[in-house]
Amino acid sequence: MENHPTLLSSPENLPPKYGNLITVLSIDGGGIRGIIPGVILDFLESQLQELDGEGARIADYFDIIAGTSTGGLVASMLAAPNPKATNRPLFAAKDIVPFYLEHSPKIFPQTSGIFAWLINTIKVLLGSKYDGKYLHKLVKETVGDTIMLSQTVTNIAITTFDIKILQPTIFSSYQLETEAELDVPISDICIATTAAPTLLPAYYFTKKDEHGNIIKEFNLIDGGVAANNPTLVGVREVSKKLLRKPGEGKINPLDFDRFLVLSLGTGTNRNEHKYEAKKVAKWGILNWLLDSGSTPIIDCYSEASTDMVDYHNCVIFFL
């Protein structure tokens, strides 16, 4: 007999939804390396199914799933509702790796031949390396373009960066109570959070009211420029929810001993470039933007952002 936990009936319920700990799942950005957390989550879900039955899903056990870039796509897959089953997710964790293996070659088609490096360099200088058309079509077909953020089976928080206002935009289930304009299709959020500069084009979409009037515009790129590791985003969203209703929850929002956080990275790039000051001292703006097929300035900001999150996590959780 299945005995898996009951999902939230509404994101308005105060965490924890199950047990005595607030549970946070965080999934880093990393492109095709999203396969790595996919493998881990598949194993975790299989172990949970041995305890609680075949119907158990990752979303049953976490108060919030935070994701950036490819991690945002995985978070959405785990939390998007199945239209054929009430309060059940559209995907199981075991579906993630096959999804990446099947579609990644089409999302990131590789140029071959002796002029491949030159062609790729020209692409990056003139526009995004990939046009994103296949990814956009795939996301809308997979998740659906009518499923809204408010409909997820557990709370999610997905990072993006708005290049028009130069500020992060966090699409969080917990924020919908005060910022209803963030209740947009999950497919749009997925496309936005994966729009990595130089690789995929920035993404524009709007939120309209019932009369068709635009109430908010979004000009978004990959959330990795702000928080490639979204662990603190997930923790902050839960804490803010508890702080808005002090005394009503079972847990003090600043009692981090009551937080159970699973933060999944995506490994490192096998062609990761590192630089020496003597060489970089001679660089101009073009070298910072592109050097031997890499994008140094973007890589530096992304790595620094991720490492600073690790640093702050150590402070918060006394690691």
Image (cartoon, rainbow, N blue to C red):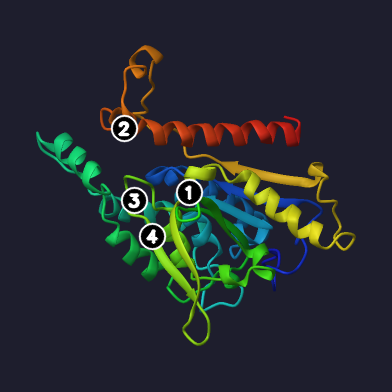
Reading the image, the residue beneath label 3 is: 101
Judge from the rendering whether residue 55 lies leftward or rightward of residue 278; answer left or right. Answer: right
Secondary structure of the residue carrying tag 4 is: strand
Q: Earlier in the sequence, mark 2 or mark 3?
A: 3
Which residue matches tag 1? 38
The answer for how far apart the CA atoms under marks 3 and 1 are is 11 Å
Would you call the spot at circle 1 few (<14 residues within 10 Å), some (14-19), or many (20 or more)? many
Q: Is residue 28 in view?
A: no
Q: Between residues 55 and 184, which one lies in front from this camera angle?
A: 184
Name the one closer to the observer, 145 or 292: 292
User: How far across and how far down the image is residue 308, in percent?
Assistant: 60, 33
Please tell me which of labels 4 and 2 falls first in the chain: 4
Side of 195 relative to 132 (left or right) = right
- For label 3, count other residues whose C-alpha is less than 10 Å away and answer few (under 14), some (14-19) or many (20+): few
Seen at 41% across and 42% down, the residue is 33
Q: Residue furthest right?
A: 247
Q: Which mark is residue 294?
A: 2
User: Dots 2 and 3: beta carbons under 8 Å?
Assistant: no
How far apart are labels 1 and 2 at the CA level? 26 Å
Which mark, residue 203? Answer: 4
Q: Earlier in the sequence, mark 1 or mark 4?
A: 1
